[in-house]
Every structure is written in C-alpha cells, then in structure tokens.
Image (spheres, rainbow, N blue to C red):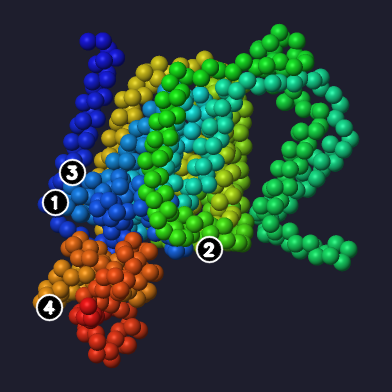
Amino acid sequence: MPRSDGRRVNRYAIGACCILLFVALQAGLRWAPPTQPVGDQAILEIYTLHAAHGTLTVGPYSRFGWNHPGPMYFYLLAPGYVLSGDREESLLITVLTLNLLSIATMVFVARRYGGPSLAYALMTCLAMLYFRVSRTPGWDFGDLLSNSWNPLSPMLPFALALLLSAALGEGQLRMLPALALVASFVVQTHVAFLPVTAVVVLSAVAMYALLHVPARVVVQPVARGLAWVRVLDGLLAICGGLIAWVLLFGGFDLSVAGHLVTVHALDRLCAYAIALVVVRHAISRRHPRVMRIAHRLVQRAADGSGRGVRWVTARPLPAKTREILVGTAAVLALLWLPPAIEQATHWPGNVVRMAQSLTEASGVNAQAGLAAFSSELVGVLRPSLRVAADGEIFTSASLSIPVAVLAMIQLVLVALGAMWASRSGRRFLAVLAGVCLVASATAFWGMVRARGELFDHLAFWIVMIGIVSLSTIASALAIWIGARFRLAWPWAARHVGIVAALLVAAFAVEGAYHIAARHQQTTFPAERAAARDLYVAIDADLRAHGLSTSPLRVDIAQDAWLVSAGVVLDLYKAGRPLVMDERWARLFAFPVDDPAANPPAARIVLADAADAMRLDNDRGFRLVASRGGVSAYLARTER
C-alpha cells in the first residue's frame, strides 16, 4: 500500500474512533446523576431542545431584546444532547469536542502554510492561556475549553477563522468553504464577532482577488514632494495627537473666536486621519517606499526598465474554482436558511430588530474601550488575566497606561513582522499579520462603540487575536534568528504532528477534568435546589388536578427569572405545551399566548416577593410552593 493511502486510512480510523468515543461519552451520561440548570444555562438547554425538535430559527437571546443571528450553535449541540438523555454535561462535552477540533485544525493550517515555527508558537500561546491558574473564584481557564455560554464558546473557532482567512488571502481558495462554515458558526453564536469576522473575511477575499486580477502599474520617477504635502503631514500629526489625547484622557472643550469646539468623537477623528492619509498618498508624488515596491513589481513582470506602464501577470485561477464557489454558496445557503425563514415569516423579524438596535445612537467611551481592548489583546502576557465569569465591568478607571503601551508595542511588532515576511517571500506569514492588524483595528472600534455597560465577557474573545498575533511575531522572530545564525531544528520540524497530538490530548484531559469536577454545575447551588423543589411541587399539583398534559401559560417575575428558567426547562422536558406573554416568549423562544386560538388550561405564575403579596389576596390563584424567594401560584383558565 502506498504511504499516502496508508496515511489516509489512518486518518479515517482516528476520525472513526473519535466519533465512537464522542457517542459513548454522550450515551454514558444517561446513567450519571441529573443536574438542575438555572439562568442562562437553562435557557441554552431550552434552545437546544427547540433545535432537537427542528423548530428553532433564531440564535441565543440578547439582553437588548433580540436574538443573535442564527441557531447553528444549537443544532450542533442537539445530537449529543438527545443521545445523553437531555443532560446538562452533554453541552459541555460537545463544546469541548468542537474546541479540540478547532485547535487541531489551527495547528494543521499553521504547519502547512506557515511552517513549523508558526505551529510551535501557536501551540505555546494556547498552552499559556489554558494551563494557567485562574484568579476567578470557582473558575479555571481549563473551564473555557468546555464552557457552553455563547459569548465564550466561539473563541477558538474564531481564532481558526483568522488562520483560514490568512490561508485564503495567501491564495488557497479551497479554504473558502471551511471558512464560510466556521465564520457562520462564530457570527451566529454571538453578534459581537460579526464586525471583526466580516471585515477579516472580506479582507481575505480581497487579497485573494488581487492575486488573480491583472494589475496595471504606472511607474513614474521619484520627484521632489510639493510644499503643501508638509501641511498635510502637520495636520495628520495634530489629528494623531488628538486621537491619543481622547483615548488617554477623554475629550475636551475649546473656545475659538467665541465658538465652542468639542473634541470627543473618536470615530470622526479616525475618519479625518484616514482621509488625510489617502489624500496625501494619492496626490503627492513623493512615495519612496511605494515607488520602490512598484519598481520591483514592474521589473519582475516586464523588461526591468522600471518606467512607463506595465501589466503585472496574475495567477491563474485553480482548476476547481467553480466547484469551490458553488460549494461555498451551498454551505452559506444551508446555514443561513433558518434566519432567513424567520425574517420572512415574522415582522419586524429578528434581523430587523437586531439591526435597529445596533444602529441606534450610542455614546463613545474611548477610555473604557481602550482599557478592554488593550487588557485582552495582551491578556496572555498579563499574570492578572481573569476568566470572564463574574461580571467585571470595564470603565475609564480600568485603563492602565503600561498595558495600553504594551498592546501598542505588540501591534507595532506585528506590523514589522508583516513587512519582514513580505520582503522575505513568506506570504502566508505576511497575510496572517495583516489579518491580525485588521482584526485588532475592528475589535478596537467595536469596543469603543459598545452599547451599555462593557462587561468583561463582551471583550474576552480579543484574547484570541492576541494569541494569533503573538504567534505571528514569535514565528517571524524564530525564522529571522534561524536564518541569521544558520540554526536548524530538524527534529522539531519533523515531529510537529506528534507534539500537536500530545497537546490536543493534554487539552482533552484538561477539559474532561473540569467537566468531571463540575465547576460550572456548582454555581448558584441555592437557586438550583429551589428550581428542582418548585418543579417537583408543580408537577405533583398538576397531576393531582388532571393537568399533566394540558397547555400551560407561564408568567415570570423579573427578580425570579434565574430560578424560573430552571423550572420552565423541567416543564418543557416533561413534554408540556407552554405559552408565555410576548416579553418572555422571546427570551425562551416559546409561542406567544393567544387565548382566541388555543387558550391554555392553566396559568402558572413564578412570583417574587412583591408579586407574592398581591397574589396571596387573589382568590383566582392558589399557592403551590415557595422556595428560595420564588413562589409558584396556579390558576385554572376558562377554555
């Protein structure tokens, strides 16, 4: 048997064994003690049940009153959840599997297109994040490998999307369907990833297109710059100073000739700076660096004269371009069909509500945004990095000048690495550095423009941009040192696969240990016990009054929602038809109560202390049980 065929058989055998292990672990949960989810975890399970029934068309719920773009995440969770008998740990095992697959694919892409140095640098940075000790009580970084909370679960797939985008920009069109799959998963799971993912993917597509479109290069002799160019450079320096002032110290007001000038709009200042740069480099004829690059391109593609007009030869399109594009279109159509159906069948629809909310006017908190961006971008290098699990909020007081300077140094090193890689002919490394810079700029814009309170979990994913950036810097530095001092690591280059397999196995053990330790199940112990006791009491009461299979309306008090989510989950698992008012129906993705169409047989109210005082005096309701500050009341309705 040829060696290539033997390797293919081995890969298929390993894949089959992994699938069988995944099925065995999920099925084995049927004999594990059941747990009682509450809060967000209970809502995630409810959405997974909707996906298992094939009725889910929206993504996770947002605190702003809409859902995230799509339900792909829950359709991936559903098979294992059904196999496990609707167990909470099933979601953790599925997320751990997806993350291990993402890590293995990241290392494979890095090794194949960036070389052994990039693969080792990436593995080192990932190990620095997930094997460190956490400062968050009750949580460890190993828990992130299996965390099913949707702001955190797409982090590793997002890092994979960065590497796939770099491979596409380098010229590997076959990565496009995989990039469409991974990017769709990341965006649908949490909308915070939408701007940066969209910009990165579009940038990669543009870089790929530039490789295959003949470029008409006009080369002119380098002439002395015009005097007004110095004026533009001065204005650009002033604009840069104003941006730095706003970032570090906030805006200021200035009175000029009796007119009040307010300087605080960071987005406008950045737009002015970009416009100045474009005008300066589009009209001025003094471009020493640009002209040298243009001369080199023309000399390689034409006759070497370096003057006049020449056509730079473009790469031919791959043989299976049409098949790849059709496959990518099919992947996108399949993955985005549920959101499209929801939008077409409802008005205003989730997409419209989300767009309206995201485009509403919001203030710019430059200092809080800079604090979040800088602290997470260099998070792997900070000993004080915390797991985003306890609701820390970034404010202006969170800004650390040393951390911001360290983040700026990292970005400068990435830019220098991109220039060096481009000159050295290492296109993938150069494109990857460019992708990191584009992602960093977009992430910074998103943090500055974030609406409401800037919680740590909304910025924690930027750690992945930092990991890929540091890996790029380390790889470029290792290659430069190796070439300068004629160093070689033949053993390390030959055994990347073995080291990667050991690392993935270590991550698997780390994730499995934290699942077995039940860190995520030990949160909210009192609320979990209260939810279980309330459900048992409600179930017994419904059976005693012949309402075990009747449609129910569930009303929830705001302060009781954490426990109530667990009660609603158990009612849904029992197969009872549930309806709610419009507010809670959006959160739980249940039908809205329509008494004219199908009136419910009974009404359950999960009340807090204030509502309980009112319902105690209402003869239409009777108290079923009261646990943990939540009281359950039941009333029959006329049918």
Label 2: few (<14), some (14–19) or many (≥20) C-alpha neighbours in 10 Å: few
Label 1: few (<14), some (14–19) or many (≥20) C-alpha neighbours in 10 Å: some
Q: Residue at x 36, y 37 (%)?
A: 102
* 576 relative to 365 in the view: left or right: left
Residue carrying label 4: 545
Mark 4 and mark 3: span between their CA atoms?
39 Å
Secondary structure state at the residue bearing disc 4: loop
Secondary structure state at the residue bearing disc 3: helix
Mark 1 and mark 3: span between their CA atoms?
10 Å
Say which of marks 2 and 4 sits in front: 4
Figure quadrant of residue 567: bottom left
| Residue 30 disc label | 1
Along the line of sight, the residue nearer the viewer: 23 or 401: 23
* 588 relative to 269 in the view: left or right: left
Vertical position of residue 369 compared to residue 9: above or below: below
Q: What amino acid type is highlighted by mark number 3? A: Leu
Q: What amino acid type is highlighted by mark number 1? A: Arg
